Image (tube, helix red, strand yellow):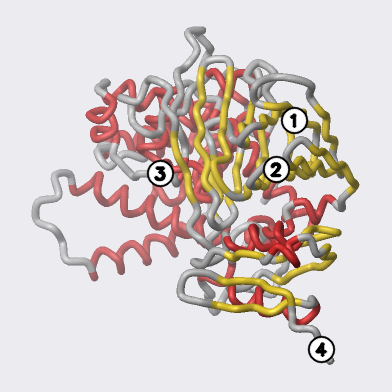
Amino acid sequence: MNDTPAPSDAQRRAAADWFTRLNDVAAEAEAWQDFTVWLEADRAHRAAYDQVEALWLALDDVEPLAAPAEVIAFTPRRRSIGPWAIGGLAAAAAAAALFVGPQLMTSQAQTFEAPAGQPRTVTLADGSKIALNGGAKIEVTFKRGERRAALDRGEADFDIVHNPARPFTVAVGENAIRVLGTQFDVVRRDRGLTVSVERGLIAVMPASGGAAVQVAAGRQLRRLGGQDEMRDIAVADAAAWRTGRLVYRDAPLSEIAEDLSRYGRLPISVEPGVANLKVTAVLKLDAEEAMVDRLQSFLPIKVETSASQIQLRAADARP
Amino acid sequence: MRFFAARSGSAVEAEDLVQELYLKVSNTEVDADIANPRAYLFRLANNLMLDRARQARRSGARDTAYRQVTTETRGSEDIADLPSVEAALAARQRLDQLTTRLRSLPAKTQEAFRLHKFEGLSHAETAARLGVSRSAVEKYISAALKHLLEVDE
């Protein structure tokens, strides 16, 4: 019986009004009767109502809204925007999502942390997503005209919604990353960072200002102390931890030790003699001890575990 | 019966629904202080239809791609109907669009909608929370729905 005409916009809007009215427990019997009359008046009315109902059910799957604790508040712009602002993301940014309660009208820094070995994804008010690897910690502050995050510790993959009116900046220790609309992974290290871009373009500069280095999709910048190193990477490897792997190419053992420390309780220290051992490997993500153990199987090192730390030392020379 | 017929468009289905409703009502302990029994009946009837729509949606090839289907299995439905990759992508895209649209709503509209839809508050409760009238809440929610409907144009 497919001869029902497609409902007009006006009919769909009327259906939306009906649906809203009837979706309340307090709806009166009269309302239901009037609704029945409306339904009978035109076959398109039923089709319209079906659409609204289907939309309502489809919304059950909208995740981010179901977890308001993950969304942060920021001060809305003082511009009046019509109810159906279709200005894309500029409108999205301007219309504040005050999920954390109407009293949070000022911008505040919000901290998000992932416990060791337990990655976690945070969705921000503008739709940007930050995937925190285990042991990572970030702070996010949204203000009028800008969006800022600080990677205090660990590694995170950023998927940032494009908005030229409100650039997104990530502070990573002494450096800052400026983002226009991109996906990239950053690891904060002791004296620097490694950032791999999956999509888009970012610029990395010292936090105190200075020359910016651009990093495009498929490229990775490793900055340690004052030294920069750029190389190509497979986009799939940029945030390999999200698919259960850690990918290293010519990485010093000290760096791997630093990374693995974030996956467990014990810090991993490396004897100076083997700290600069270059490693090219793909490690399967596992419990800290298991991963360290595997290192032993292909590197000339010995693992010594104590109550307070794991130590990597040179393997004894064999006769 | 008239309601079911008008809502489902099929006399056969309507009769079916009447049976189901009758069964449901006769098996439920009637709560003596339902303020408005007729409205309650309508509401029950409507929920029956909504549940059917939900089930139909779950077994619908287009949407199961997105949900984790392992949660429920119903004997009579055909779960061998695996969706195509395109259908899955389309569903995912639509969901993303809806989410973006929701976020682009003005603050109060969005919050009213969130409280009612996602926290399950009634109109009266939502109104109390936001400090506005019930009719204002209905306007917000309706506005939100209309805004979202535009995604499918």
The image quadrant of residue A37 is top left
Tag 1: amino acid = Val
Q: How far across and down, in percent of the image, does residue A153 sit?
A: 56, 46
Residue plotted at (72% across, 65% down): A245
Q: Nearer the viewer, residue A269 or B12?
A: A269
Tag 4: amino acid = Arg
| 4 or 2: mark nearer the eye | 4
Q: Disc 2 sits on a residue from what chain? A: A
Element marked by disc 4: loop
Residue sitting at the far left: B32
Tag 2: amino acid = Leu
Q: Which mark is residue B118?
A: 3
Q: Are marks 4 and 3 in contact (CB under 8 Å)?
A: no
Q: Are marks 2 and 1 in contact (CB under 8 Å)?
A: yes
* Disc 1: which residue: A204
- Label located before the other in sequence (2 or 1): 2
Q: Residue B146: tell me if it is visible.
A: yes
* Disc 2: which residue: A193
Tag 3: amino acid = Phe
User: With A36 as the anchor, is A13 left or right in this view?
Assistant: right
Q: Are marks 1 and 4 in contact (CB under 8 Å)?
A: no
Element marked by disc 2: strand
